[in-house]
């Protein structure tokens, strides 16, 4: 009983405590018991309210913290979405540029007269290919070279001489010529061939150089020409068949406009 009264006093129910003390005198035991129960109920209700208020305060603080976190997350999400939009826009621009690059039709720098002459050359030599839209000429290396060799055959000297005469016309002498060699994917097998051309890359480059030297012999200036080789790495047909491998063994001659951009290619006209 004493501990209960002390809890009432500490909980702020002083008035109720005084009422109980005053009513204890002369009150019946039943009435006293009921008063004690009532006081205990009020105490418990008051304590529960205090706990609820404390819990509500804590929940309000947590809610405010969650709202701040939500605002920060929303700001980060908006920033991420903006970055994503920027990346998508940049990606679309790159795709458009790449698509334009792929679909752009190259224009031949040759005039109608040179195009006609090269078309006649193509009809005369079945192994010689010419694209009038791009100005690219292709020679089968089976026409130009013996197997595994980089010496031009006597039979192919005539077609190179005719090609050089067309390229030496006054109105096309400003055009550049790039010779590119290609092979199939069969590795160099013969030891004596491998001693001269260790790989297909060497063989394709040596053959391109041989064509350049032959064109120089037929009067095309060295300052107009360049040579390179790609080995087996740029096939135009499947290497699974002999027909495909034969198509891949080729030498391409690109006729380029004077302003064509090629790394390391500048005007090297000999000084007098």
Image (tube, helix red, strand yellow):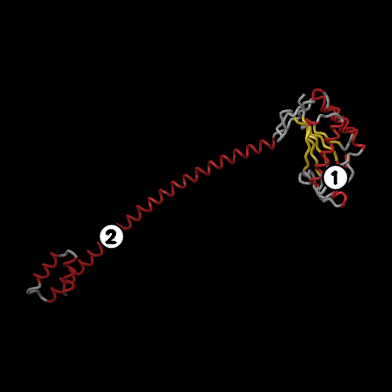
Q: Which quarter of the figure is the C terminus placed in?
A: top right
Q: Earlier along the polypeptide chain: callout 1 or callout 2?
A: 2
Q: Nearer the viewer, residue 135 or 15?
A: 135
Q: Nearer the viewer, residue 263 or 2?
A: 263
Disc number placed over residue 54 in the picture, else none? 2
Q: Residues within 10 Å of mark 2 (few under 14, many from 20)?
A: few
**From this viewpoint, which residue is outermost toward the top?**
170
3D distance between C-alphas at marks 1 and 2: 89 Å
Q: Residue at x 85, y 52 (%)?
A: 189
Q: Is 32 on the left or on the right of 259, as rendered?
A: left
Q: Residues within 10 Å of mark 1 (few under 14, many from 20)?
A: some
Residue 180: name its quadrant.
Answer: top right
Q: Residue at x 35, y 52 (%)?
A: 64
Residue 52 in picture, x, y percent from top left: 28, 61
| Contact between labelled residues 2 and 1, with CB atoms less than 8 Å apart | no
Residue 121 in picture, x, y percent from top left: 87, 31
Residue under label 1: 246
Q: Nearer the viewer, mark 1 or mark 2?
A: 1
């Amino acid at each position: 009983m004493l501990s209960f009264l002390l809890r009432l006093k500490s909980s702020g129910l002083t008035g109720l405590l005084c009422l109980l003390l005053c009513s204890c005198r002369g009150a019946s035991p039943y009435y006293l018991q009921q008063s004690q129960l009532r006081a205990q109920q009020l105490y418990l209700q008051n304590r529960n309210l205090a706990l609820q208020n404390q819990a509500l305060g804590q929940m309000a603080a947590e809610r405010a913290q969650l709202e701040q976190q939500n605002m920060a997350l929303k700001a980060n999400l908006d920033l991420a979405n903006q970055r994503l939009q920027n990346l998508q826009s940049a990606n679309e621009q790159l795709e458009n540029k790449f698509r334009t690059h792929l679909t752009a039709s190259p224009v031949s720098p040759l005039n109608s007269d040179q195009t006609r002459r090269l078309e006649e050359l193509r009809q005369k030599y079945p192994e010689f290919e010419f694209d009038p839209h791009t100005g690219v000429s292709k020679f089968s290396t089976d026409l130009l070279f013996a197997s595994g060799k980089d010496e031009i055959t006597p039979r192919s000297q005539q077609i190179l001489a005719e090609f050089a005469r067309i390229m030496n016309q006054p109105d096309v002498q400003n055009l550049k010529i790039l010779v590119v060699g290609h092979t199939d994917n069969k590795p160099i097998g013969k030891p004596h061939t491998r001693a001269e051309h260790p790989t297909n890359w060497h063989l394709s480059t040596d053959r391109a150089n041989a064509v350049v030297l032959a064109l120089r012999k037929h009067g095309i200036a060295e300052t107009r020409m360049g040579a390179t080789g790609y080995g087996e790495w740029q096939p135009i047909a499947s290497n699974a068949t002999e027909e495909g491998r034969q198509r891949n063994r080729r030498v391409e001659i690109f006729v380029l406009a004077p302003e064509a951009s090629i790394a390391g290619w500048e005007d090297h006209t000999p000084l007098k």
